Amino acid sequence: MQSYDERLTAPRSWWLVAALAGVSLGLVLLPLGVLPMLGGVIGGVAVAAAAVSAYGSARIRVVAGSLVAGDARIPVQALGATEVLDAGEAAAWRTYKADPRAFMLLRSYIPTALRVEVTDPADPTPYVYLSTRDPRGLAAALAAVRA
């Protein structure tokens, strides 16, 4: 059985933006003195880094017969066909082709995705859209668990 585990980490440029946000807060507090400025830099960087880390902590896993994506846990038996989406198709499914009932784990900095049909008749979710750097690997892991 093939396993799959991916963390959708934020790109390095987002960490730079977090550092710049802290520096900006320090500059705002500079007229109050050096200590408030240092506190602003440290606090601003910490808060911005925590926000980037939280956003980049989403995981996609295939474990124990289930697809775990963010907060969702879906048994593989409730999943149907998979569709590997290149950058163009992924953008289309994020925008004009999107169904508002779908579960979407989106990360704008990841251009490729996997779309998986949900076949459970009791579930109103038509499909699961997952931003992933390795859509073929995820599709293969799902196929291996089903077999």
Image: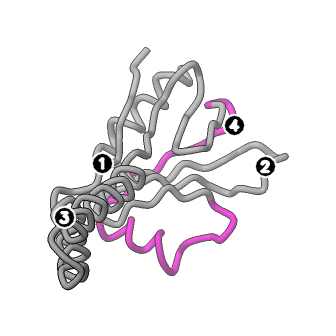
Mark 3 — residue? 38
Q: Residues within 10 Å of mark 1 (few under 14, many from 20)?
A: some
Whether the residues at callouts 1 and 4 have beta carbons within 8 Å, the answer is no
* Residue 116 image position (x, y, % from top left): 54, 48
Per the model, the C-alpha gap separating discs 3 and 1 is 28 Å
Q: Secondary structure at mark 1?
A: loop
| Residue nearest the viewer, comparing 95 with 50 | 50
Per the model, the C-alpha gap separating discs 2 and 4 is 9 Å
Per the model, the C-alpha gap separating discs 2 and 1 is 29 Å
Q: Callout 4, which amino acid?
A: Ala
Give whichever of discs 3 and 1 has the lower sequence position. Answer: 1
Magenta-span inclusion, residue 87: yes
Q: Callout 3, which amino acid?
A: Leu
Q: Which residue is outermost to the top? A: 1
* Residue 78 tag number: 4
Residue 29 occupies quadrant: bottom left
* Residue 44 image position (x, y, % from top left): 29, 65
Mark nearer the viewer, 1 or 4: 1
Give whichever of discs 1 and 4 has the lower sequence position. Answer: 1
Magenta-span inclusion, residue 58: no
